[in-house]
Structure formats: structure tokens, C-alpha cells
Image (spheres, rainbow, N blue to C red):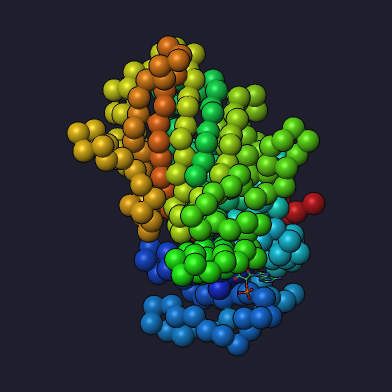
Amino acid sequence: MTQSYRVAILGATGAVGTELLALLEQRQFPLADLKLLASPRSAGKTLTFKGETLPITAVDEHSFDQVDIVLASAGGSTSRAWASTAVAAGAVVIDNSSAFRMDANVPLVVPEVNPQAAASHQGIIANPNCTTILMSVAIYPLHQIQPIQRIVASTYQSASGAGARAMEELKLQTQAMLQDQPAIAEIFPYPLAFNLFPHNSPLNQQGYCEEEMKMVNETRKIFGVPELRVTATCVRVPVLRAHSESINLEFAQPMSVEQARAAIAQAPGVKLVEDWSANYFPMPIDASGQDDVLVGRIRQDLSHPCGLELWLCGDQIRKGAALNAVQIAELLVEKNLLKPAMAMA
Ligand code: A2P
């Protein structure tokens, strides 16, 4: 008999939460029970799963009793508030927030890149930042051929990265501006419709925002190369869903475009999208709703003999968040890793 598991989604009403629900259904995750948790604002509301109406409850200290896996996507403070309760109740938390990502006791996992890291979990596994997941999946096949020495990333990030309300805000701003009305910004600091601005996360003393430092630090942790040279510029653009990234890679030895193309064409989780005669390459509109990260425009860096340029688009809500989390849950089931290696300190 196939074993099945009791799963809770914390943040079930959010942009990632609703995608988690859809993915558990689409991928036929072996469920014995499914609990939908959110804030008290959503208590009493319902969501549909496999044609059934499921209640949403406000998270409390008993929410994780009889739960094997918690898929958490309700922000860092909610994860910090509830993860230890869930772990104490015997669940494994797959956390989409940044709360525990750089904790040495918490594996940071992209299943196509470092699935082995999941085995060392102590109750919490972190899902990396969305831009980092998309970049990691795309460049890891090249790193396997020849270690990457340096990464320069520039991102073009959609509204979905800031949640369901941010997506709604972009739609309302667009409608308002088309009617010559002012664009009201409440979630984002500035109007995003017909505009763009550097990523709206806190800046450090060196002038890098949090999102950029996530790309630096998380990529190092996922690749297991603490000294990897990574720099990033993250920009929010008026796209509803799916992030784009321009990536410059430097290797120790030249890597041919053909070699890179062949590696990406056969790697899991990525799809080579290049039609040079039509000038057709990955676009966020094509990546939306897709599992694969679309990669294209692979070309020699004209300024460096060991450099390559590439362009990618990936669904931030799917592979950048919900899909990666569900893949981690599938990995735990497949490798029988649901019992924590040891109790949380
Ligand atoms: P709610 O809808 O009840 O506010 P998004 O990232 O799309 O904005 O979604 C955030 C998710 O996190 C929502 O499901 C939201 O629930 C949930 N959430 C936000 N704050 C809390 C909290 N304090 N406790 C539990 N869930 C929360």
C-alpha cells in the first residue's frame, strides 16, 4: 500500500499558498489529510481542492498536531512564530520565507541542484529565494561541466514576488493610468505600472538590497561554494508573474556556446528556448504557469574569453516558490526523510 501524508499549508490564501494547493492536486501528492492555515482574517473562508470545499483556519498552537509536512508561505515573521511549534509537534517544515535560509542547521534546497542537502534536516528545510532558485537551476548544469568562477546577475522581477496583493495593485494601477487617474501605491513604495525601480527590499551599508544579497549568499550555500563570487542588481518591473534574469558567467577555462547549450538542453527543470532567426527567446509571458525555467540567448561574452551570457525567465510563484517546495516534499517522501535527524536545539 502506498503511504500517504498529512500536510498543512501555512499561508494557504496567498499567491504561493494557492499555487501549493494546485500543485499538490496536479502532482497527485500522496495526501492523507490537508489542512489550510492562514491569518485570523481568513478564518471561516474556504478553498477548493479536488472538487472538495476545505475550510481555512487561523493558525494556532494545535494547528500542527497530527501533521507530517508543513508547507509554509506566510512571510518570515509567521514562520519564525510557528516553525518551532510545528517541529515540536513532529512535522517537517518546508519554509518559503527567508527566516531560516542562512541558518547553518537548515538545509537550503533546490532539488535539481543539491537534493543530498535535505538529508541533514533537523525539522526545517528552507526553500531559497525565487530569483536564486531560477538562476541556480539554469546555471548548475554548466557549473557541473566546469566550476563557475564569478556570476553577475541582473534581474527583472514581476509583481508576484511581493504577493497576491501586489499583483492586484499592479492591475489597479494599470487600469487607473489608462484612464488618466493617479496610480496608487500601497504595497510597493512607488507606482509600478508603466515604470520600474530597484528592488524594494532594505539596503545595506554597501548599497546592496536584501534581495541582491540573497542571490549572493544563497547561491553560495546551495552550490556549496562559500567563496563563489556573485554580484547582483535586482529590479522590479511591471510584469504580473514570472521573473527574468540576465546572467553573466565567468569560468576558469573557455566554455563553448555549443557545450553550454547541449548541457542546458538535457538538464532537468530547464528548457532551452532559442529561435535566433525569429529573435524569439524566453519571455515572462511564456514562462508563466510553466514548471521549467526557460533559458536562451546563450552567447559568448565579448569582453572575456572565459565568459558566457544567458537570459532566463521562470515562473516565480511556481519553480521560484511553490513547485520547489512541493519537489522538496516529494524528495522527503521518496528518500524516507520525514523523521528529523535530531530534535531542534
Ligand atoms: P491571510 O490571507 O489570512 O492574510 P501573499 O504572500 O500572497 O501576500 O500571502 C501571504 C499569506 O500569508 C496569506 O495566506 C496570509 O493569510 C498569510 N499570513 C499573513 N500573515 C499571517 C499570520 N500572521 N498568520 C498566519 N498567516 C498569515
User: Left or right: where does residue 189 sit relative to residue 273?
Assistant: right
Residue at the image position 57 percent from the left and 66 percent from the top: 182
Nearer to us in this view, 239 or 254: 239
Q: Residue at the front extreme?
A: 180
Pick the front one: 80 or 308: 308
Give the quarter of the image for residue 6.
bottom right
Ligand 1: which quarter? bottom right
| Residue drawn at point x = 41 percent, y = 27 percent | 309
Q: Quadrant of residue 35?
A: bottom right
Using residue 338 as the reference point, say whether residue 315 is left or right of it.
left
Q: Position of residue 230 (x, y in %)?
A: 59, 29
* Residue under the point 19% across and 33% down: 277
Quadrant where the N terminus is found in the figure: bottom left
Q: Position of residue 113 (x, y in %)?
A: 48, 38
Q: Is residue 277 above or below residue 338?
A: above
Task: Name which quarter of the figure residue 311 lies in.
Answer: top left
